[in-house]
């Protein structure tokens, strides 16, 4: 009887582990296929924070600005060299209908993370983007969620290289929280063989 109960309780765990291993294998195979075909690895971004309201929220785009946890166009991007430079930049889709893409940059004055055309990105700070256990720019993870002007619960993405800038935002009466930005690979965008 006890042995039967142990077997019944072990089955869901075994199935879950097997599914996780299969998903990891599919993702590695898709990334290898993309690399062999010379395609970029597309990814989506989400937040990691000790604040429950901001933890594991998708990063989305609306009107050239990045929002956290809002129902807007989902971030779907990849890293590539900025046109006519050797600087690793980030590009993302900005809409599906009509299809459009843009360059991700940090606004020089406001430090807000935005997306726009090459001229807008070039006039601001657009790289070097990398992924080292989290998204980094110029070797630093200095991302902050700042409550937007749209009211409580609407958070926008900023990059404050100096933590004092985030503290300054707080002194002005806005909520600001330091976060890390993670990626999830989007294997569905990679064509199958």
Image (cartoon, grey):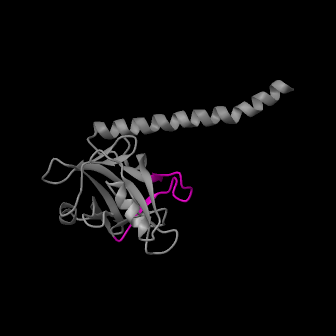
Residue 58 belongs to magenta span? yes
The residue sitting at 81% across, 24% down in the picture is 3
Residue 192 belongs to magenta span? no
- Total number of numbered labels? 0
Image coordinates for residue 32, horizontal then vertical, percent = 35, 35
- In depth, the one of 130 and 174 nearer the eye is 174
Please give the range of residues in magenta.
46-63
The residue sitting at 37% across, 39% down in the picture is 31
Does any portion of residue 88 appear in the rendered image? Answer: yes
**Snapshot quadrant of residue 133:** top left
Residue at the extreme left of the image, as rendered: 84
95 relative position to 125: left or right: right
- In depth, the one of 31 and 141 nearer the eye is 141
The residue sitting at 38% across, 55% down in the picture is 143
177 relative position to 38: left or right: right
Q: Is residue 26 depicted above or below 159 in this figure?
A: above
170 relative position to 152: left or right: left
Image coordinates for residue 123, horizontal then vertical, percent = 18, 64
**Snapshot quadrant of residue 15:** top right
- In depth, the one of 179 and 120 nearer the eye is 179
- In depth, the one of 10 and 114 nearer the eye is 114
Look at the image and tell me in which quarter the N terminus lies: top right
Image coordinates for residue 44, horizontal then vertical, percent = 41, 52
Look at the image and tell me in which quarter the C terminus lies: top left
Image coordinates for residue 63, horizontal then vertical, percent = 35, 71
Q: Is residue 184 depicted above or below 177 in this figure?
A: above
């Amino acid at each position: 009887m006890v042995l039967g109960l142990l077997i019944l309780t072990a089955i869901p765990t075994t199935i879950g582990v097997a599914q996780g291993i299969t998903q990891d294998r599919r993702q590695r195979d898709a990334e290898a296929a993309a690399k062999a075909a010379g395609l970029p690895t597309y990814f989506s971004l989400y937040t990691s924070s000790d604040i429950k309201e901001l933890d594991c929220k998708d990063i989305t785009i609306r009107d050239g600005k990045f929002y956290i946890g809002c129902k807007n166009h989902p971030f779907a991007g990849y890293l590539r060299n900025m046109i006519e430079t050797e600087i690793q930049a980030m590009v993302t889709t900005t809409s599906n209908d009509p299809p459009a893409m843009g360059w991700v940059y940090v606004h020089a004055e406001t430090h807000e993370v935005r997306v726009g055309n090459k001229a807008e990105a070039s006039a601001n700070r657009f790289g070097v983007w990398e992924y080292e256990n989290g998204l980094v720019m110029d070797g630093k993870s200095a991302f902050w969620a700042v409550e937007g002007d749209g009211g409580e619960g609407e958070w926008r993405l900023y990059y404050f290289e100096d933590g004092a800038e985030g503290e300054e935002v707080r002194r002005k009466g806005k909520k600001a929280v330091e976060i890390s930005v993670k990626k999830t690979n989007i294997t569905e965008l990679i064509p199958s063989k």
